[in-house]
């Protein structure tokens, strides 16, 4: 194989496909990227055994062929090179020569015959949605996905489409993020849990925000084909927990706050709170919210800001990082916090009554 292509475009391809390559496996071929050249095009594919990400780009191909090169190594080398043309060539079955001007890197390769092909997908159901809406919806909940490998089903986002409403839900049991989009006529009904890793790859597809993307579900997988890029992933299997039970059925106290003020003051308090598991105490009176953080080593922090409060004073503690994450998807100027008592979960939502997003956060001990 012998190819030459612009460094920038080649880097975009290897970095996209590199999202799927595995770094935690003893199967060496899954730690590589497959670069396959035809007459005028190359395909760069990454795979971890459950997800495939493929990018294609036009290229000067002198000799067709295929190679498998360590993914992390290839991404790191290409990212560090200046703009210009990158060439890859093979002289035997075990080495690849990457050149850029006077720079030369000789890399070990594996047999591309052993690289797993992407499986078929789709056939059961599908729906179409503008890429920008999908990205925004995913961004508003993905922060709440669990990182606990023992709770595998919670390491993804639940997508539920009923024919007129698309619902996205994520939880790590300490917080719950929900986004609802009213969109009749997108496609067939869907109920699936998509891994976080795959959603990040789908978000990064090289399409404009107003381009409709089609998600096809079937055979326990979901796939998205965007022409020059493709993502195929296994879905997480199992019944997603009944998240609605976590949402308080009623609330007795409400704070209405300027979102940007709350965010900036919590960020400052977090400088001290990091040494105490990010615990921040919030004490709301009729017109003032007091934010307090304490560290045995660093000292204390205190911030105040005006609020509109209902039904009396309450003091409650939250993980400050969770509060900042919950505020990020709120686009309007105001945030509403709904509570009952210090030991019960609170709901963070936009001050706009028409908002389709909310986040439930479990409180921390006040001690």
Image (cartoon, grey):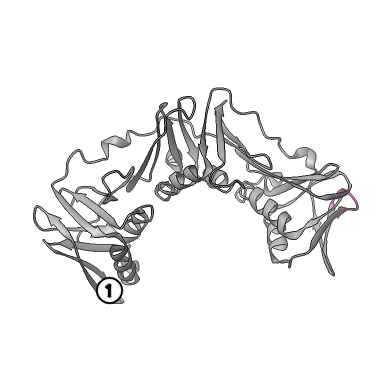
79 vs 185, left or right, is: right
Residue 222 vertical position relative to residue 341 in the rendered view, above or below: above
Magenta-colored span = 90-94
**In the image, 56: left or right of 264?**
right
Quarter of the rendering containing residue 226: top right
Q: Residue 244 lies in what quarter of the image?
A: top left
Q: In terms of secondary structure, where does tag 1 sit?
A: loop
Residue furthest left in the image: 312
Q: Is residue 199 above or below residue 118?
A: below
At 91% across and 53% down in the image, what residue appears? 91
Residue 117 percent across, percent down from the top left: 71, 35
Say if residue 156 shows up in the picture: yes
Residue name at image x 70 percent, y 66 percent: 80
Question: Label 1 belongs to which residue?
Answer: 296
Residue 266, how many percent across, how many down?
30, 65
> Which residue is at the front of the view, 129 or 326?
129
Q: Is residue 169 above or below residue 175?
A: above
Disc 1: CA contacts within 10 A as few (<14), some (14-19) or many (>=20)? few
Q: Position of residue 119 (x, y in %)?
A: 66, 31
Q: Residue at x 45, y 25 (%)?
A: 189
Residue 150 visible in rendering: no
| Residue beneath the point at 70% across and 47% down | 28
For the stretch drawn in magenta, what is the main secondary structure?
A: loop
């Amino acid at each position: 194989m012998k190819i030459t292509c612009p460094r920038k475009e080649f880097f975009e391809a290897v970095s996209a496909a590199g999202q799927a390559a595995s770094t935690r496996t003893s199967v060496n071929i899954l730690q590589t990227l497959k670069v396959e050249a035809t007459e005028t095009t190359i395909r760069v594919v990454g795979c971890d055994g459950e997800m495939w990400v493929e990018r294609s780009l036009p290229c000067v191909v002198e000799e067709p062929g295929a190679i498998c090169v360590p993914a992390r190594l290839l991404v790191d080398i290409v990212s560090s090179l200046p703009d210009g043309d990158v060439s890859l060539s093979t002289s035997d079955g075990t080495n690849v020569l990457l050149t850029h001007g006077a720079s030369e890197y000789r890399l070990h390769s594996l047999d591309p015959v052993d690289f797993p092909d992407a499986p078929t997908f789709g056939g059961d159901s599908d729906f179409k949605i503008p890429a920008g809406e999908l990205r925004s919806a995913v961004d508003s909940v993905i922060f709440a996905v669990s990182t606990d490998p023992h709770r595998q089903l919670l390491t993804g986002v639940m997508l539920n489409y009923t024919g007129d409403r698309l619902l996205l839900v994520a939880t790590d049991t300490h917080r719950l993020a929900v986004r609802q989009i009213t969109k009749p006529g997108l496609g067939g009904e869907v109920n699936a849990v998509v891994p976080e890793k795959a959603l990040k790859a789908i978000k990064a597809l090289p399409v404009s925000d107003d381009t409709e993307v089609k998600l096809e579900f079937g055979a326990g997988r979901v796939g998205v084909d965007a022409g020059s890029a493709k993502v195929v992933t296994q879905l997480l299997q199992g019944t997603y927990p009944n998240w609605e039970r976590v949402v308080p059925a009623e609330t007795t106290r409400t704070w209405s706050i300027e979102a940007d003020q709350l965010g900036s003051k919590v960020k400052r308090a977090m400088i001290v709170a990091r040494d105490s598991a990010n615990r921040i105490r919030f004490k709301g009176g009729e017109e003032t919210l007091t934010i307090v953080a304490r560290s045995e080593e660093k000292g204390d922090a205190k911030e105040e800001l005006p609020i509109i409060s209902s039904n009396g004073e309450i003091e409650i503690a939250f993980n400050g990082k969770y509060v900042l994450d919950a505020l990020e998807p709120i686009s309007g100027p105001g945030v509403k916090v709904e509570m009952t008592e210090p030991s019960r979960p609170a709901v963070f939502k936009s001050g706009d009554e028409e908002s389709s997003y909310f986040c439930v956060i479990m409180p921390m001990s006040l001690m």
